[in-house]
Image (spheres, rainbow, N blue to C red):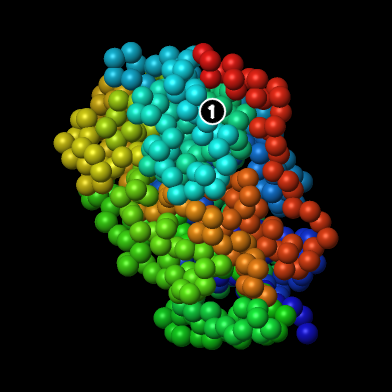
């Protein structure tokens, strides 16, 4: 009898797990089923729309070649959809050799325009506190916030504005996660003002990563069951081990039960940073939703009740005010804005990085990617993305919080910060997106709040998501989901191949020296 695998959730974690089961676990694709509540696979790595109604992306994850060991280990095996005889990895390397990141306008302030970023702006107290935090063990940092370790002036430094907007940190977020980022991305510390280490895909990440992986999995025989919401995992205890015995779901509104036989495996994407997302339009603001409107956290909460080894979802989903921000995607119908940004920033689209308006009440940032950003995008249409970390604050040019703004008002605020004529975005379509749990994985936590990919007492259930515990790696990255998937698959299938190790750049004396020199400027 063939072993079968069921994956609950159709995001990049589940898709990566399916690929590793086929490539390294030697399973048949026809024995793998992915169950997804939405109509489209990819989870948070989304991208959709058209030039008439406007394109939309909830976000775009930062990629690097210096890290992301598991991600590139996966995509070296996935054929590109746009380049013949090339893998997604090879295609991405070639693209980034042609389009190198060198931001010339990383920070913008109200009075000087492009703000100087040659100095990180640290005082000696800032340096001492940052060094102490980065060298403190995680048990001591447990449950604390960044503000517990760094004084108020630190949050006005050029470094904080650049680091926090690159990675979406808030002052009240986890000191543990902030420390992990300092170590994991120490190479980026030395080039944070140019974002020289940031790499991009040819198109948005849905079209460049999700679609090729989805196509490959379909060709291998993997079954994608869409519009299928899993409501419960029936289970039993066998020799002290937790065993999933059946999957209860609602498929297109009809209740079903899927038997999980002895030897079968279940992989569960617990929690979602884009759960309860809502879109607005040029005339309407996104609706304020929560987990009560979507049920995306319900199954994890149910499984974790009375089982501390399955984590503590309440740590992550109980304070929307501290885990939310808002993004927006703009479809421009004439070249005036892109031309103005080139003259303002000194960067061609696709060669800069985030442009952050440090005096923005919303702390707004925008990024202009290489065009086209979507396959089939017309030559006379441009697409760019932006976000703001403080959507609850009243704007500088629009007298209301961003969360209450429609797309037209967001464009007015953006043009105000740039001192651009609003006509530069005439006929543009701005689609705002409210995401109440987008940085929920950054909430202060302690050991055990996140389950291991395969909990110690689990026989056939694994967790794959941004809410599992992986030593040394950092959440809010594609890499974390892929690494969790690879670790879970290798453990449950007993794959005789090590998961690629996290590269210890922070242990390199050369990297440490360069970071020290940077901190002293």
* Rendering coords of residue 368 (x, y %): 45, 32
The answer to whether one can see residue 19 in this image is no
Q: Looking at the image, which residue is at 52% across and 44% down?
A: 140
Front-most of residues 237 and 405: 237
Taking the image as shown, residue 75 lies to the left or right of residue 447, namely right
Residue 321, relative to residue 167: is it above or below? below
Front-most of residues 413 and 176: 176
What is the count of numbered marks?
A: 1
Give the crowd class for mark 1: few <14, some 14-19, many >=20 residues within 10 Å.
few
Q: Which residue is mark 1?
A: 131
* Rendering coords of residue 439 (x, y %): 43, 48
Q: Looking at the image, which residue is at 39% across and 69% down?
A: 295
Query: Residue farthest to the left?
Result: 399
Q: Looking at the image, which residue is at 74% across and 62% down?
A: 490
| The quarter of the displayed image where residue 423 is located | top left
Which secondary structure lies at badge 1?
A: helix
Q: Looking at the image, which residue is at 29% across and 42% down?
A: 391
* Rendering coords of residue 70 (x, y %): 69, 49
| The quarter of the displayed image where residue 495 is located | bottom right
Taking the image as shown, residue 94 lies to the left or right of residue 388, namely right
The answer to whether one can see residue 480 in this image is yes
């Amino acid at each position: 009898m063939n072993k079968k695998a069921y994956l609950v959730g159709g995001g990049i974690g589940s898709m990566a797990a399916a690929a590793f089961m086929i490539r390294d676990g030697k399973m048949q694709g026809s024995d793998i089923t992915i169950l997804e509540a939405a109509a489209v696979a990819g989870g948070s790595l989304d991208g959709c729309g058209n030039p008439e109604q406007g394109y939309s992306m909830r976000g775009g994850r930062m990629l690097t070649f210096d890290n992301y060991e598991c991600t590139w280990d996966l995509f070296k095996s996935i054929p590109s959809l746009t380049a013949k005889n090339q893998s997604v990895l090879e295609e991405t390397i070639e693209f980034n050799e042609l389009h190198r990141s060198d931001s010339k306008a990383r920070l913008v302030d109200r009075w000087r325009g492009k703000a100087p970023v040659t100095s990180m702006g640290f005082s000696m107290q800032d340096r001492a506190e940052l060094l102490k935090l980065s060298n403190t063990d995680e048990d001591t940092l447990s449950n604390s916030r960044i503000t517990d370790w760094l004084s108020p002036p630190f949050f006005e430094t050029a470094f904080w504005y650049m680091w926090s907007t690159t990675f979406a940190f808030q002052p009240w977020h986890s000191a543990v996660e902030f420390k992990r980022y300092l170590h994991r991305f120490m190479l980026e510390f030395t080039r944070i003002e140019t974002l020289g280490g940031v790499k991009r895909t040819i198109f948005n990440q849905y079209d460049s990563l999700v679609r090729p992986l989805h196509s490959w999995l379909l060709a291998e025989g993997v079954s994608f069951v869409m519009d299928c919401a899993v409501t419960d995992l029936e289970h039993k205890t066998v020799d002290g081990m937790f065993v999933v015995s059946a999957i209860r779901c609602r498929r297109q509104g009809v209740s079903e039960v899927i038997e999980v036989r002895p030897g079968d495996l279940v992989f569960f994407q617990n929690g979602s940073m884009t759960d309860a997302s809502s879109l607005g339009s040029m005339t309407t603001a996104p609706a304020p939703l929560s987990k009560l409107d979507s049920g995306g956290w319900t199954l994890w909460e149910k499984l974790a009740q009375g089982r501390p080894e399955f984590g503590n979802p309440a740590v992550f989903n109980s304070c929307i005010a501290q885990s939310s921000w808002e993004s927006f995607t703009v479809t421009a119908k004439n070249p005036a804005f892109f031309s103005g940004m080139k003259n303002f920033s000194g960067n061609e689209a696709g060669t800069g990085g985030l442009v952050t308006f440090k005096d923005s009440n919303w702390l707004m940032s925008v990024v202009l990617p290489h065009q086209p950003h979507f396959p089939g995008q017309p030559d006379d249409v441009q697409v760019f993305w932006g976000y703001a970390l403080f959507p609850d604050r009243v704007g500088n040019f629009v007298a209301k919080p961003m969360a209450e703004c429609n797309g037209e008002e967001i464009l007015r605020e953006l043009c105000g910060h740039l001192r651009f004529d609003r006509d530069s975005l005439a006929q543009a379509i701005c689609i705002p997106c409210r995401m109440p749990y987008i940085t929920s994985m950054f909430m202060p936590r302690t050991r055990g709040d996140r389950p291991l990919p395969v909990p110690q007492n689990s026989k056939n259930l694994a967790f794959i998501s941004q809410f599992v515990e992986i030593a040394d790696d950092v959440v809010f990255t594609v890499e974390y989901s892929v690494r969790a998937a690879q670790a879970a698959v290798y453990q449950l299938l007993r794959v005789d191949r090590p998961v690629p190790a996290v590269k210890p750049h922070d242990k390199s004396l050369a990297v440490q020296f360069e970071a020290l020199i940077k901190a002293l400027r």
